[in-house]
Image (cartoon, rainbow, N blue to C red):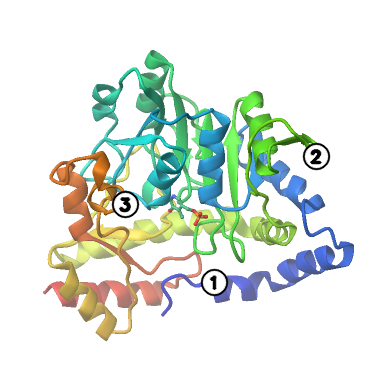
């Protein structure tokens, strides 16, 4: 069994993917070819976000977002410590200061009720992460941002395709804040065959800034109006995303159903496993199917012996990482620390079979018996 099954997906989509790649090889526009704008338009249609800018990776999208809002050294960005390092990395790279707010212990997303107390005159932005594929509490976060004139940047690297209703109409991840950044790393819900990412925004000025920053700050050929980066997404990778969009709706439905089924099977097994809480006004697309257990090392070892791969997203929150420890006391953020000790990700992909899922849950229950 594979942790993320990309081979079955390729086998199913082979004709479409091969044809898309061949078309790029035939026209030869490897940099900023027609597939780039075609993918951006397809993702605007899919998410409902007014603007999409394809970039080199999810990390690059986050970096370009902060550059586009003009983050200055010393500016503060409120974010969660329980995330992949890239979230805080881009803040620090620009001389900014990550200010951590702890997570909700049951959903592992940033606790929106803790954010307002962290706002200072130096705060510029709030960067929630829609962890594991569940959109953070965006209505509450946007309300804090509105009160204090802050920008909200959703780190949607794991949540592309997730729905969010909140107090208003149904929206999709990447269209629930002024800016959102996603990743097409192969194992993410919408993946390419290398690195890729996208920035979404409702603000045309931020979209224009991001387009310029993506190509070394050029507003015209060899006319550099600002400092930028080499942040383009390859035409070939956009072609892969376009082919994968053909069955993406099916994949999302399948991920939601498999997530529900995992929960049902685990509950029915009676095993002492804490399921991730998914709020009734949103869904989780399960970039990873993550649960919480005590004595994780022995559970992982037992699953490995049964031929079932697992992973830990993430063992240590950022305020306990050497590179980011200076931004917080190591003893704070108790919920993030505890989650880091207990989270365990099980195999997940749209092509996971019910038989495989049964095997995973049986082995999990046995390991905890
Ligand atoms: C994967 C991921 C990123 C980075 O995306 P890349 O495309 O690998 O650069 C950022 N934030 C989170 C939460 C992620 O899971």
Q: Secondary structure at mark 3?
A: loop
> Between disc 1 and disc 2, whose residue precedes?
1
**x%, y% of residue 198?**
60, 46
Task: Looking at the picture, tell me which residue is in the foreground, 171 or 140.
Answer: 140
Disc 1: CA contacts within 10 A as few (<14), some (14-19) or many (>=20): some
Task: Looking at the picture, tell me which residue is in the foreground, 196 or 310.
Answer: 196
Name the quarter where the N terminus is drawn.
Answer: bottom left
Asked if ligand 1 lies within 8 A of label 2, the reply is no
Residue 305 in view here: yes
Give the numbered dot on residue 222. 2
Question: Mark 1 — residue?
Answer: 6
Calculate the distance from the C-alpha at mark 1 to the C-alpha at mark 3. 33 Å
Asked if ligand 1 lies within 8 A of label 1, the reply is no
Q: Residue furthest top?
A: 147
> Between disc 1 and disc 3, whose residue precedes?
1
Name the image quarter holding residue 308. Answer: bottom left
Above or below 226: residue 37 = below
* Residues at circles 1 and 3 in contact by the CB criterion of under 8 Å: no
Q: Is residue 44 left or right of residue 75?
A: right
Q: Secondary structure at mark 2?
A: loop
Number of marks in the rendered image: 3
Disc 2: CA contacts within 10 A as few (<14), some (14-19) or many (>=20): few
Q: Is residue 15 left or right of residue 28?
A: left
Residue found at x 34% / y 17% = 121
Name the quarter where the C terminus is drawn.
Answer: bottom left
* Residues at circles 1 and 2 in contact by the CB criterion of under 8 Å: no
Q: Secondary structure at mark 1?
A: helix
Question: Mark 3 — residue?
Answer: 323
Above or below 255: residue 150 = above
Residue found at x 63% / y 36% = 227
Disc 3: CA contacts within 10 A as few (<14), some (14-19) or many (>=20): few
Above or below 332: residue 225 = above
């Amino acid at each position: 069994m594979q942790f993320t099954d990309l081979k079955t997906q390729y086998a199913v989509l082979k004709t479409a993917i091969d044809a898309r790649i061949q078309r790029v090889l035939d026209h030869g526009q490897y940099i900023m070819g027609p597939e780039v704008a075609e993918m951006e338009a397809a993702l605007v249609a899919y998410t409902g976000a007014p603007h999409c800018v394809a970039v080199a990776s999810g990390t690059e999208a986050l970096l370009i977002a902060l550059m586009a809002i003009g983050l200055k050294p010393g500016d503060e960005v409120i974010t969660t410590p329980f995330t992949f390092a890239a979230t805080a990395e881009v803040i620090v790279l620009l001389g900014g200061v990550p200010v951590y707010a702890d997570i909700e212990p049951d959903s592992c997303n940033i606790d929106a009720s803790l954010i307002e107390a962290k706002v200072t005159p130096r705060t510029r932005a709030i960067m929630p992460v829609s962890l594991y594929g569940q959109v953070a509490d965006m209505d509450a976060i946007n309300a804090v941002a509105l009160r204090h004139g802050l920008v909200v940047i959703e780190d949607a690297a794991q949540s592309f395709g997730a729905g969010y209703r909140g107090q208003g109409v149904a929206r999709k991840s990447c269209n629930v804040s002024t800016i959102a950044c996603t990743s097409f790393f192969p194992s993410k819900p919408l993946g390419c065959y290398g690195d890729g990412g996208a920035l979404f925004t409702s603000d045309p000025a931020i979209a224009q800034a991001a387009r310029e920053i993506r190509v070394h700050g050029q507003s015209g050929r060899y006319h550099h109006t600002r400092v930028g980066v080499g942040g383009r997404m390859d035409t070939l990778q956009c072609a892969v995303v376009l082919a994968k969009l053909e069955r993406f709706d099916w994949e999302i439905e399948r991920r939601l159903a498999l997530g529900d089924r995992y929960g049902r099977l685990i509950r029915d097994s009676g095993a002492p496993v804490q399921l991730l809480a998914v709020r009734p006004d949103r869904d989780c697309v399960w970039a990873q199917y993550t649960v919480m257990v005590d004595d994780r090392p022995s559970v992982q070892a037992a699953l490995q012996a049964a031929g079932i791969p697992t992973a830990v997203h993430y063992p240590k929150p950022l305020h306990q990482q050497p590179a980011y420890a200076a931004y917080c006391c190591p003893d704070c953020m108790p919920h993030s620390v505890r989650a880091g000790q207990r989270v365990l990700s099980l195999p997940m992909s749209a092509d996971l079979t019910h038989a495989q899922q049964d095997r995973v849950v049986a082995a999990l229950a046995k390991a905890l018996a």
